[in-house]
Image (cartoon, rainbow, N blue to C red):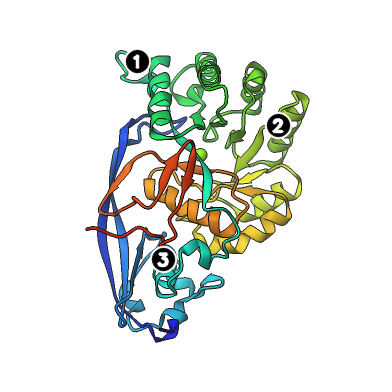
Amino acid sequence: MSLSSHIITSVTAETITSHYPRAVGRNSFRPEHGSGGGHTVVVLRTNRGASGWGLPGRGLSQPAQFIGRSVTDLIDPDSGVIDPAALPLDLALHDLTAKILDLPVFAMLGGRGERTTKCYSGAIYFDDLDPENSPRGLDAIQRNLASDYDLGYRDFKLKLGRGYRWMSHRDGLRRDIEVTQLARELYPDADILVDANDGFTVRTLAEYLEATSGCSLFWIEEPFQERPEDFRALRDLLDACGSAALIADGEYDPRLDMVWRLAADNLLDVALMDVVDFGVTAWRHVMPRLADLNVRASPHAWWIPIKTLYAAQLAAGLGNVITVEGVPGTTSGADTSGYQLSEGRLTIPETPGFGIPLTV
Ligand SMILES: [Mg+2]
């Protein structure tokens, strides 16, 4: 059945629910991340009986405006969403279109990567600082690492920047260093990624890098806001200590002009725009240019476990993804069993669309 014969007949909302394996605590600036929660998803149906769904992007308004529109009016399978008003339906339209074409999304995106991708745990937060009246300290970090290892993760991202808001500068930096050294000591083969959520200064980072020079960090994420002069200082620091750590940024409220500027100046190694808010279509547009500039990608996925699955489809479809951010947890209302995490690698299914049936 040709794509153009499919007309959207309904746009409805459903709710799925994420469950983390444990309550997730603070990062450098946010108080706590809870245990999961409900998310509205949008479901599209066509006059030919096809359906697709996904997390909505920002700014979905008047969903009824899409009823009566041809699918080919809204999305081109070769490039993504073509009507800007339909961009908040990016994921649902990709799921729907790939299902109509009887293709997995990654194949519709070009199949330039691998179906199995490295996937790290992004859930090592500041649980050492809680509960407030009797903080658990480094034992909490050790337990969380072990718990995520048992789930199948082999690489870990450690949140840094305890001295930004929650501890004194001195104590926070010391703890950040201890956490890093602990993770390296316990998991000698792991990729250790670190993320300060813009909670460091260049000087703090210099002290941190010196103290952890034996930890062979995989990447440094969002150490501070994206200012070229500070990123130049970061590159110089890494070069001076002979570190191979990658510079990862572009997650928070990305300004693409800054991403391109840093990339052109060799100050960015991994681009982190969000898989939902930035979106599949935007990723399809920027990936070839990033690859030309020798910048790898890792679409941001935190807080919803199914965002990890979307990111893995992008990795298999567009290529150039160095690793996928794992959000440990399960989802009720959606069957994610086609995706398998084992030995630190996530394998995606070959079923049409995203291969995640709604079960609500
Ligand atoms: Mg981050």
Q: Which residue is mark 1?
A: 135
Image height check: is 285 above or below 254?
below
Residues packed near mark 1 inside 10 Å, few (<14), some (14 to 19) or many (20 plus): few
The picture quadrant where one finds residue 267 is top right
Where is residue 335? Give x, y as percent: 30, 53
Whether residue 84 can be seen here: yes
The picture quadrant where one finds residue 198 is top right
Where is residue 210? Give x, y as percent: 67, 18
Q: Are marks 2 and 1 in contact (CB under 8 Å)?
A: no
Q: Which residue is mark 2?
A: 244
Disc 1 marks a residue whose amino acid type is Pro
As drawn, is 130 to the left or to the right of 173?
A: left
**Label 3 residue near ligand 1, CB within 8 Å:** no
Q: CA distance from mark 2 to mark 1?
A: 34 Å
- Compare marks 2 and 1 and give the one earlier in the sequence: 1
- Compare marks 3 and 1 and give the one earlier in the sequence: 1
Q: CA distance from mark 3 to mark 1?
A: 47 Å
| Quadrant holding the N terminus | bottom left
Question: Secondary structure under badge 3?
Answer: loop
